[in-house]
Amino acid sequence: MPSKSYNKSVFINCPIDRKYEPMFRSAVFAVLRCNFFVRCAQEEQDSSAIRVDKIFRMINECKFGIHDISRTQPDKKTQLPRFNMPLELGIFLGAKHFGGGDQVKKNCLIFEKRSYSYDRYISDIKGQDIKAHQNKPQTMIIEIRDWLTANSNKSSPPGGTALWKEYQQFSRWLPNACWEKKLKTAELTYHDYANLVYEWIETM
């Protein structure tokens, strides 16, 4: 398990629902397999905590950030879009711009669904290198692997295609591992899933 330090911590800002779960799980796998530490809102369950304060703290503690701003469609119930992801991206960019010390070293990877779609709803980030994942876990894994490797001289994971094959192997291993631990794959918490990823990595 990697050390939970600023330079090895990756904040993941993405939708949290069943539809997005395959993408989230692939992102967590890629980060952990590259020997980094995942930070996300799901890691803490505390009803007494103020959510935005928790986000501030986590972003402050992470050099890296993965931000998926692809969820732009209105919610079926409210007919309104969710703005949490752009808000958290803004907090991360603000910390880099206005913060001192290690904060200015922040580095982020921004995802959208289709290339240049962001220009129609958040044009202020135009000119940055935005990646389109097309809702494909394989693309997510490869992009994260290449980004972390490019920005760390201590990370030497397999190539993107090889890492995708490892994820497929892990996905086939996961159901039996869950059965042995009396867990259901569809009901895994973030910590359940992360611990299983670590367990699989240690068996390699």
Image: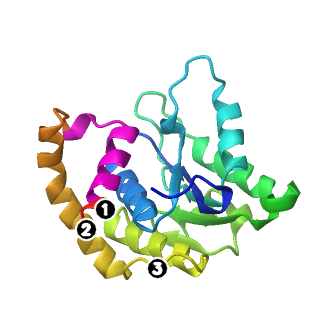
Disc ID at residue 73: none
Q: Closest to the observer: 22 or 56?
A: 56
Q: Determine the residue positioned at 76% across, 67% down.
A: 105
Q: Which residue is mark 2?
A: 204
Q: Is residue 96 magenta?
A: no
Amino acid type indicated by mark 2: Met
**Image quadrant assignment for residue 3:** bottom right
Q: Closest to the observer: 150 or 140?
A: 150
| Disc 3 packing (10 Å; few <14; some 14–19; many ≥20) | some
Disc ID at residue 156: 3
Q: Which residue is mark 1?
A: 201
Percent across and percent down for residue 158 are 37, 80
- Look at the numbered disc 2 and give the secondary structure of its residue: loop
| Disc 1 packing (10 Å; few <14; some 14–19; many ≥20) | some
Percent across and percent down for residue 51 are 63, 29
Q: Determine the residue positioned at 46% across, 79% down.
A: 156
Amino acid type indicated by mark 1: Ile
Write down the region rendered in magenta.
Answer: 185-200
